[in-house]
Image (cartoon, rainbow, N blue to C red):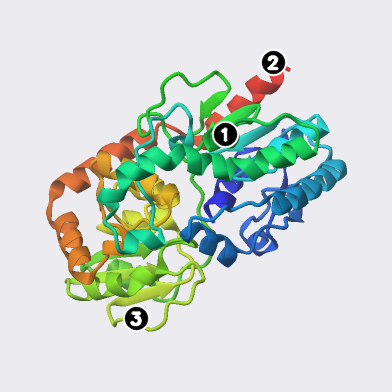
């Protein structure tokens, strides 16, 4: 969902009188777009469940065969649209297809994947972390990380060679940020970079919210004086942690608001109000704590709302984002392997009872509101096109 929502926010920032926006995304997202695009297309992508399974087991996410198919699809889209600029969010084939077509492209990636960010060594959830402590594995992961990055970069470089292009780098982060423009959907105070070049730009958190009717229970729940906790593990968070989350919350005097993102969650306790999709930032603003997977798709709207977070990360991207959130003082992280009801209850009681978390979240809310993507992004494009 994050890789759809950020381009959707950018598309919404571009006024139709000035820009023609053509949006290619899996068809399941089209209903969420409204009138933000001059043209819509169905983009073929990996099956989400297969992607998450590979991610959870440390596998290579995009093989050479997949990337070749993506490149051919990209080229067909470019021929149809003839764009002046291509923008992609985690579409690794664009660093092959765009140069082949002589087109400039912009890569959307969080700044914690920038080569100019000192990335901490945090081993993600892997089969081995279920029986060896991540604290023991972190130093080993730091030593092996260049090899892991090279392994994931290899298919991109192989396909570039197959199409007559030179390889980019063995460092996966260089491939992620290989665009003519690099767009960080972040704020610079939150992710500190050192020595980033001029074509790297912070564009704000790309706030985007789904436009769907509020559920029937919304008014009654929001009118209640009972403390509310918003739980949203998104489309990629560790759903296996949800039973422990709900058990921990059932022991506390709170009302739980659960967004499932369309995923099957089974039975829920009586203190839970449930919906598929909810306006994230609005719901967070009316809650005392947000429980999330810790990815930036949850962190930024929670902090924008001034609400602290309990993060339960699993994959590496979530861990990196959650570590930034915790370092900012705005929440607590509990690894998914350690997410027992007792540990989660303890973290929730701290977040609900210690004012410092709320104070930190409110401080970051003030910082984040200075970065309006709807203004920053069109201004950036105007300057970039004006330079030719």
Does dot 1 land on a helix, a strand or a loop? loop
Which dot marks residue 268?
Answer: 3
Depicted 10 relative to depicted 250: above or below: above
Mark 3–mark 2 contact, CB under 8 Å? no
| Residue 123: x %, y % from top left | 36, 49
Does dot 2 land on a helix, a strand or a loop? loop
Sequence order check, earlier mark of 3 and 2: 3
| Residue 79: x %, y % from top left | 87, 42
| Residue 384: x %, y % from top left | 66, 22
Sequence order check, earlier mark of 2 and 1: 1
Residue 233 or residue 153, whichever sits in front:
153
| Residue at image mark 1 | 170
Which quadrant would the N terminus be assigned to in this image?
bottom right
Which quadrant would the C terminus be assigned to in this image?
top right
Residue at 65% in and 59% down: 46
Q: Is residue 293 left or right of 178 when viewed as pictured?
A: left
Label tally = 3
| Residue at image mark 2 | 387
Does dot 3 land on a helix, a strand or a loop? loop
Q: Is residue 277 left or right of 362 when viewed as pictured?
A: right
Q: Is residue 163 visible?
A: yes
Residue at 66% in and 24% down: 382
Sequence order check, earlier mark of 3 and 1: 1
Q: Quadrant of residue 228?
A: bottom left
Residue 76 or residue 349, whichever sits in front:
76
């Amino acid at each position: 969902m994050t890789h759809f929502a950020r381009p959707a926010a950018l598309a919404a920032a571009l006024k139709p009188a000035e820009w023609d926006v053509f949006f290619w995304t899996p068809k399941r997202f089209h209903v969420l777009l409204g009138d933000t695009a001059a043209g819509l297309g169905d983009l073929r992508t990996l099956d989400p469940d297969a992607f998450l399974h590979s991610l959870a087991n440390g596998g290579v996410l995009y093989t050479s065969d997949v990337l070749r198919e993506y490149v051919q699809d990209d080229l067909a889209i470019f021929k149809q649209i003839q764009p002046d600029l291509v923008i992609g969010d985690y579409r690794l084939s664009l660093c092959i297809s765009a140069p082949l077509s002589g087109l400039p492209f912009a890569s959307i990636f969080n700044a914690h994947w920038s080569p100019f960010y000192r990335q901490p060594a945090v081993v993600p959830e892997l089969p081995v972390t279920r029986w060896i402590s991540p604290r023991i594995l972190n130093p080993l992961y730091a030593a092996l990380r260049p090899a892991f990055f090279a392994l994931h970069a290899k298919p991109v470089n192989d396909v570039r060679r197959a199409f007559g292009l030179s390889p980019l780098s063995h460092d996966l982060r260089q491939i992620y940020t290989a665009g003519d423009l690099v767009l960080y959907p972040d704020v610079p105070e939150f992710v500190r970079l050192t020595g980033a070049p001029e074509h790297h730009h912070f564009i704000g958190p790309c706030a985007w919210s789904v436009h769907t009717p509020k559920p029937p229970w919304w008014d009654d729940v929001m009118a209640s004086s009972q403390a509310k906790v918003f739980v949203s593990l998104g489309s990629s968070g560790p759903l296996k942690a949800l039973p422990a989350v709900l058990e921990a919350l059932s022991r506390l005097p709170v009302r739980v608001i659960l967004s499932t993102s369309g995923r099957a969650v089974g039975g829920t306790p009586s203190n839970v109000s449930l919906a598929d999709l909810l306006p994230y930032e609005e719901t967070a603003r009316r809650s005392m704590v947000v429980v999330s997977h810790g990815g930036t798709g949850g962190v930024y709207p929670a902090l924008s709302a001034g609400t602290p977070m309990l993060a339960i990360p699993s994959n590496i991207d979530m861990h990196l984002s959650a570590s930034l959130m915790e370092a900012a003082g705005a929440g607590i992280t509990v690894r998914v392997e350690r997410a027992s009801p007792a540990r989660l209850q303890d973290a929730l009681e701290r977040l609900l009872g210690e004012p410092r978390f709320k104070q930190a979240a409110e401080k970051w809310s003030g910082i984040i509101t200075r970065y309006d993507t709807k203004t920053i992004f069109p201004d950036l494009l105007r300057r970039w096109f004006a330079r030719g």
